[in-house]
Amino acid sequence: MTAIAFLIGVLVLVIGLAVSIALHEVGHLLPAKLFGVRVGQYMIGFGPTLWSKRIGETEYGFKLLPLGGFISMAGMYPPAPEGEEPSRRRSRFFATMVQDARDANAETLIAADDRVFYKLPVYKRVIVMLGGPVMNLLLAFLLSAIAVSGIGVATATTTVASVSQCVIPASEERTDCTAADPVAPAAAAGILPGDVVVSVDGTPVSTFAEAAAIIRDAPGRALPVVIERDGARQTVTVTPARTDRAVTDDQGRPVIDAAGVAEYESVGFAGLLAQQALEPQPIWVGPEATIQQVGAVAQIMTQLPVRIYDTAADLVTGQPRDPNGPLSVVGAGRLAGEFAAVDAPILARVQSIIGLLAALNIALFVFNLIPLLPLDGGHVVVALWDGLKRWFARLRGKVARPVDATKLVPVTFVVVVLLIGMGGILFLADVFNPVQLL
């Protein structure tokens, strides 16, 4: 059953990612058609066409390699000036690439009847190019809202899930009790799994975190604890044992001292483990979390070359990878499978996979805004540069020629090669040195 659940998780992730890509292209398609641009193709994937159907002037279909999607708009670039000779500074290889791009663009102009992309006002071109990333952002908002408000966030309740039988210092790497270990205070007080903690030391508690905070700050002091068992309340006395606990930072990571040793602090310990329950959050929590994730992913993108280098180094050395680092589709699929196969309620597993899909859409949103061709952000920069060029020309009483982005094809080629290389490193890392979250 675990293997089947893993495969189901991977399949759900693949379908969800395909839908995200399809909606991304819809984000380009709708405004392009709204502004009158002739759209020849709407395709999911690349390579040979597996299936397609023409509806009106647009061919809709699927291609062999499910690594993205595209729409083919007439006149993405202006026609090359007649008689223009290739630049002598450009190699024959790149000159051929530029000419091929111009030839492909010229084919889209044949039946366009002047309904071409490059003639749109700058703001309309920006809207068309931003439509795809914005669609991913809206989808991330929706998925996050479903995950945290529709389903809920795993929260520790005041119901006791289990009771430790002994006190084991956190600095000792073992889980089994020995005869020398003292009995855990909660077990000594007679607290049982299923009991509900009502109050601690006279303070009513509504969450396990509130109860744990009181116990943690009262080592060695007898605390009256009111519990509810089988509908009846009773009071027991718990004297938290003094034990050590690893010090963590704001992100839950262990604090390491100058000698490279983990730091510990002395706290009270009762030996209670709370039951987890999915608690729906207010409707604004999902969007807030999405905005925060956008900032975090944007920071990762600014450090992408360094992150990829670190991932490659971890792959070679076998060191554990940063769980907040970049992933390939293989890594995301693996996580989805692990989420689906974990020993947890089905709803909790669904919530985790939906959250993962939301994170992937955030990544698609941020990644496509990188201002380099062939990404959407690169096309936005070209449109803005064209508008700025025309504005300066008008100030001088002249008419500027449209920006010919086909001249940037060599840059596009270099970017694509780099992206393929980085994708290859992530793919190998996700296969041979995957991120360990569970």
Image: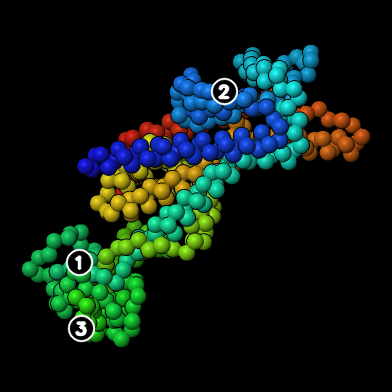
The residue beneath circle 1 is: 162
Which numbered disc, 1 or 3, marks the residue closer to the eye?
Answer: 3
The residue beneath circle 3 is: 234
| Image coloring type | rainbow
Amino acid type at mark 1: Ser
Q: First in sequence: mark 1 or mark 3?
A: 1
Callouts 2 and 1 close, C-beta under 8 Å? no
Which numbered disc, 2 or 3, marks the residue closer to the eye?
Answer: 2
Q: Position of residue 353 (x, y in %)?
A: 38, 47
Q: Position of residue 114 (x, y in %)?
A: 76, 24
Residue nearest the observer in this picture, 103 or 312: 103
Q: First in sequence: mark 2 or mark 3?
A: 2
Pointer 2: residues within 10 angstroms few (<14), some, or many (20+)? Answer: few
Q: Residue at x 25, y 39 (%)?
A: 4
Amino acid type at mark 2: Arg
Q: Position of residue 436 (x, y in %)?
A: 32, 46
Task: Give the Cα distance between marks 1 and 3.
Answer: 18 Å
Task: Give the Cα distance between marks 2 and 3.
Answer: 73 Å
The residue beneath circle 2 is: 54
Callouts 1 and 3 close, C-beta under 8 Å? no
Is residue 313 visible in the rendered structure shown here?
no
Is residue 33 visible in the rendered structure shown here?
yes
Q: Residue at x 86, y 35 (%)?
A: 393
Q: Secondary structure at mark 1?
A: strand
Q: Quadrant of residue 38?
A: top right
Amino acid type at mark 3: Gln
Vertical relation: 287 (above or below) 407: below
